[in-house]
Image (cartoon, rainbow, N blue to C red):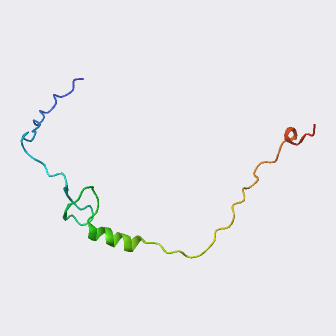
Amino acid sequence: MSNPPAAPREPIVFPARDQAFDLTAFPCPRCNQVVAAEFYGPCTACAAQLRVSQQGEATGVVAAAYEPKMNVTPNAVALKDD
C-alpha cells in the first residue's frame, strides 16, 4: 500500500514589515460594528443592553441553614469506649 502524494501547499504570505497595524480597532462580537477600545469585548451600546437584560433583582428569600446529612453509620471502633 502506497499513500498518494500530498497536495502542494499554498505559500505563506507575511505582511510587509513596515506595515502598521491598528490593534485597538476590532468588530464588536455582538453587533459587528467596528469598535476602537483598549480591550476586546462588546461596544458600549451592547454592554449597556447586556447590563439591563442580565441584571438580577434581590428577592429577599433567605436560604435554609446547611445541615450535612449523615450518610454513614459510625463503626464499632469509633464508638468503642477506652
Instruction: Residue 54 in the image: state x and y as whole percent.
Output: 41, 70
Frontmost residue, 76 versus 55? 55
Q: Is residue 57 above or below residue 69?
A: below
Frontmost residue, 41 versus 29? 41
**Image quadrant occupied by the N terminus:** top left
Frontmost residue, 8 versus 14? 14
Residue 28 found in image quarter: bottom left
Residue 78 found in image quarter: top right
Q: Give the farthest residue toward the top.
A: 1
Which residue shows up at 69% across the image and 64% down it? 65
Left or right for 48, reference 69:
left
**How many numbered discs?**
0
Q: Give the farthest residue toward the right.
A: 82
Which residue shows up at 68% across the image and 67% down it? 64
**Image quadrant occupied by the C terminus:** top right
Which residue shows up at 23% across the image and 59% down it? 37
Left or right for 45, reference 61:
left
Left or right for 4, reference 82:
left
Instruction: Residue 26 in the image: state x and y as whole percent.
Output: 20, 57
Instruction: Residue 43 in the image: state x and y as whole percent.
Output: 26, 65
Q: Give the farthest residue toward the front.
A: 38
Which residue shows up at 53% across the image and 74% down it? 58
Instruction: Residue 59 in the image: state x and y as whole percent.
Output: 56, 76
Residue 67 found in image quarter: bottom right
